[in-house]
Image: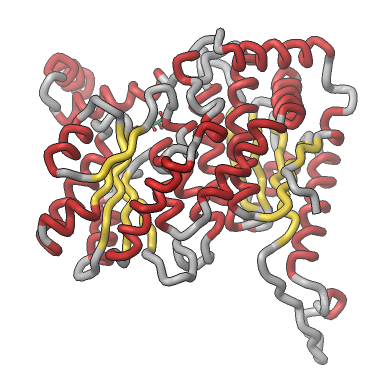
Amino acid sequence: MNDSIQVISKFALQGLETQALRDAAMAAKQTLESGSGAGNDFLGWLHLPSSIDEQQLQAIEESAAQLRSECEYVISIGIGGSYLGGKAVIEALSNHFAAYRTDGGPKVLFAGSNIGEDYLYDMMDLVRGHKFGIIVISKSGTTTEPAIAFRLFKEMLEQQEGKEFASRNIIAITDARRGALRRLAIEEGYATFVIPDDVGGRFSVLTPVGLLPIAVAGFDIRALVKGAVEMEQGGEEQVLDYAIARNALYQQGKKIEILANFTPRLHFLAEWWKQLYGESEGKNHKGIFPASVDFTTDLHSMGQWIQDGERTIFETVLSVGDQQHEVIIPNDDADLDGLNYIAGKNVDYVNKMAELGTRLAHIDGGVPNLLITIPAVTERYLGQLIYFFEKACGVSGYILGVNPFDQPGVEAYKKNMFALLEKPGHEEATAQMKIRLKQ
Ligand code: PA5
């Protein structure tokens, strides 16, 4: 077994990579590493893995141990970059039918990533009468979705368990100095962790934003960080290969990248990846649209489009070497389902043949195919994958000619929502909105 993720792009890239693109990628990497490009005040993630020290890891582990010792549930509240990294890693490592490791620790639930009234009601119903803790994560401290969820669960926890239990089991992760959440944490005496100024939300999974929920769920954050350090120090070729491949394809009119997995536990890793690439590259009316599918499930829904629809897509397959468990397909004397030809094989063998068959079919159908292999879904390899995708995203964004580290476009819906909600300070926008809606 390899001890690193591998990026293999030979099917797609034969004859595709140009010297000009390799030069552009080298220049983009240099711009990133020298900190001379757009958004260079948000490069704190670049050497983050190797800068995490023993003291920081211990502080996170101690807070996780506190929550694990007193809580049956821990609600991690946050949205976007303050949510998806932790969710992705926990889902990738957990038992599929319980968002936690089967070691008796608390279940980690996620709130504040939507404004679903029934979602919040159901979660309140679930934790009512149970001891629970809260990790509230917001860099700005003012984001509406997590603020609503935090107000609800804070009040519920204080009423249910008392103020003392609540302030012991609420942990805030926010900006070092600014914001409503920082002020509240100081007033209420919550333990806090800092989101560094120079690390944007979607690059923050290896800060306490991701590491604390992951540690609460019982997973090994040291191994995760170790994997990321390995990529930080040795992933250069992989990063360049991927960045070049996707930009070469984009320049040839492949505007959509579909991240495909054949491993159900990777669903949320793709959600995290979509935010990373979508928010980083979709600017100035440019950028590859990041989409994702879960195979073989989606072969029975999206498979037709991918095989035969408009030829503007390419596919990046996340292929996993080893499963954690073996399940053998049994023999059946009657063989009414005709499956005896694979009796005695393990389920993953069939899945691997589906994967290879799909990749070849899609290549034949005009869908270029990149392949990223992960030896197994473990903390270490997830750490490698996370850092690999982050760095490739920075390089890729600079090749494209955008600032990969801002997200001005996400403000537009907020302005409208605040106008419609008649938030103080938005009076003029509210008046304009009323005129617009009458037309
Ligand atoms: O990547 C980003 O910057 C965003 O997704 C933010 O993380 C998200 O909007 C949440 O912001 P905040 O942490 O300030 O609540």
| Residue 393 x %, y % | 60, 26
Image quarter of residue 365? top right
Residue at 12% from the left image edge and 18% from the top image edge: 427
- The quadrant of the picture showing ligand 1 is top left
For residue 357, above or below residue 285: below
* Residue 245 appears left or right of 420: right
Kindly tell me whether residue 183 is visible in this rendering: yes
Residue, far bottom: 333
| Residue 148 x %, y % | 21, 43
Residue at 27% from the left image edge and 61% from the top image edge: 122
Residue, far right: 15
For residue 403, above or below residue 232: above
Observer-nearest residue: 77 or 209? 209
| Residue 312 x %, y % | 70, 29
For residue 203, above or below residue 130: above
* Residue 350 appears left or right of 283: right
Residue at 40% from the left image edge and 66% from the top image edge: 105
Observer-nearest residue: 57 or 187? 57
Kindly tell me whether residue 249 is visible in this rendering: no
